[in-house]
Structures are given as structure tokens and as C-alpha cells.
Amino acid sequence: MHPRNKNANGYDFTALTATSAALAKYLKTTPAGTSSIDFANPAAVKMLNRAILMHHYGVKGWDIPAGYLCPPIPGRADYLHAVADLLASCNKKNIPAGSAVRVLDIGTGANLVYPLIGHADYGWSFLGTDIDEAALANAQAIIGKNPGLTEAIELRHQPVWDNIFTGLLRSGEHFDLSICNPPFHNSPDDVLAVSQRKWNKLGKPGARRGSSEPRLNFGGGGTELWCNGGERAFVKSMIEQSAQIPKRVLWFTSLVSQADNLPHIEAALKKAKVVESRILPMAQGQKQSRVVAWTFCANGDHEKWRRDRWSATPAFGRPTLPESPDAGQPPAVDPV
């Protein structure tokens, strides 16, 4: 995990239950004698997320409707720390912080996790977008329970299913980053097949059609989990649409879960004639992932961007280079 990740050394269940007492009933003792939760229990995962967001990020009253994605917080935090280091590479090795740094979160979802973490850790402001109006309504409810977020997080509905950036930005809007956790799967059947494998590893039958158990221990449905063509097609479309607004965002980024998709994504980047692209590796326990980042701005554009937008912003400080993913004991995250 990234060294700035608040869960880099695992979950401190004593501290988390002190902040959120409701988590205590979901704790269990592992064979090694340590505390954990049943990661196959969606209610336990949801309560863990609520406790983490309250304890580490000061978020009150976090909740999501049944069936919506309940993401593992450490992995989401790692993404934000990785792109913070990306910005630092254009800012004399200092992470630009504060509300002047604007981040566009594509598919922010009902959980609103990226804006909640990014604002708490770096003071960034966010525009969260989604095609799901019910998800945005829940995200707005979270903001409403935390008045300090009202000025920091704006939400916007994208009404056109196939549009990502197209038709979204208003006149004069610029963003230092765009981030996205794209739909991973190609179809509902793909979701079912992958979920069945996960449940089997956990010794649970829950992914079967007609089962009373949820299909995924971290939930999610519809647009959160699948689109035609899956992750590969979504990111390729994102790249194509980003070329229509090349200087409105300094760094476009997306999570890419499947390494097999990288050659196709790299081909799309070349076709779009990006000036630079980078692959930012991430790891949580045994899970390997990466962020793809690309920009249409040359070095001179980066320097002008830094002077115009970041010269008056507070610097978070010199980023620490991430340690080897194998360093130390892996934290107790989703075991599958």
C-alpha cells in the first residue's frame, strides 16, 4: 500500500470501534488471534466503511442504499495518493493542496468515497458526476450530513448514457485531475460468474441466481459493475472523449483492474495522440492493480499550469516514494 494510506498497517479495530461502536458486533477473532470481520457479510463491510470514514476522514452519517457499491476504502485511498504524487511530479515534488485544486470524479456513485477521502486528505474540491440520479441523491444526502463539504463537493448528472466527458463541462471549467473507477464487467452474466468464484473461495453459495445472498460482498449493480465492452471499452471511450477537451484537464486518469486491457488502452492513447501517458502501479495485499494517466499538455503547458493554478496553493509536502508492495505485513483487506 501507499505509505500515506491510513490503513497501510491494517485496520485498527480497537480505534475504529471506539469511534463507531456499532462495528463491535461484527468483529470476530481470526485463527491467528487478531480481530477482523467477515468480509463475506455485506452488512459488516458496510459498517467497517462507515467506521473508517468517520475515524480517519471525519465523515458523519455515511450510508448507501441496498444494492449499491460499498467499495474497500484502502484501495480507493491508494488511487488518490497515487494521483497526488502524479501532480507533485509537475509541481517541484510538492503535492498541490487546498480547494483551488479541482478534481473531476467520473461515476462518483452513491458512496461518494473518492471526494470524501480526497477532500479530507488534501483539501481538494471535487465535481462528482454520474448517470444514476438515485446515486447522486444519496451522495447529496451524505454531503448534507456534513456541512463542511457543501462548498467542497459539487454533483452533476450526466444524462446521456454513452457520454463521459462530452457535454459535461461548463464554459471556462478546468480540472487538475479526472479520476474514474470504470465498470469492470461486460455483462450481468460476467458479474455473476466472477461473483460465484469469489463466493466459492469464501465457502459461500451466495452468487447463485435466485439465492437470498447478495451476489457481491461489496455490493454494486447496474452501471457500477458492467457496461457493453467492460472496462476496456469504457476506458477507450474515455480516451476518445478526452481528446475533445485536451486542455481542460491536466491529467486524465482511470483505474485499470485487468492487466490484459493495457495493450488495448495504450493503443487508444497512441491513436488519440496524447503527449504523455503513465502507468501507476498499485497493490493491496495480493491484489495488483494500476492507474493509467494521460495528458495532452506538454512540459511548457505543465509549467504554465503550475504557475497559474498552484503557485498560491498550500503544498501538502514532499511525497514519500511508495514502498515495495511486499514490504511489511499486508493489511486485512477484502481477502478475495
Image (cartoon, rainbow, N blue to C red):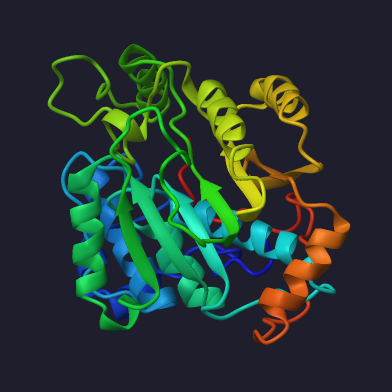
Q: Position of residue 306 (x, y in %)?
A: 75, 72
Number of callouts: 0
- The answer to whether residue 106 is visible is yes
Q: Position of residue 325 (x, y in %)?
A: 73, 50
Residue in the image at 78% along x and 27% along y: 270
Q: Quadrant of residue 59?
A: bottom left
Answer left or right for 107 relative to 323.
Answer: left
Is 310 rendered above or below residue 162? below
Is 208 rendered above or below residue 77? above
Residue in the image at 79% along x and 69% along y: 304
The residue closer to the viewer here, 230 or 174, is 174
Q: Quadrant of residue 155?
A: bottom left
The residue closer to the viewer here, 112 or 21, is 112
Image quarter in which the N terminus is found: bottom right
The residue closer to the viewer here, 256 or 98, is 98
Q: Position of residue 138 (x, y in %)?
A: 20, 56
Residue in the image at 67% along x and 75% along y: 309
Q: Position of residue 81 (x, y in %)?
A: 63, 62
Answer left or right for 29 relative to 249.
Answer: left
- The answer to whether residue 15 is visible is no
Is 101 rendered above or below residue 225? below
Residue in the image at 66% along x and 64% along y: 84
Q: Quadrant of residue 93?
A: bottom right
Answer left or right for 265 relative to 18.
Answer: right
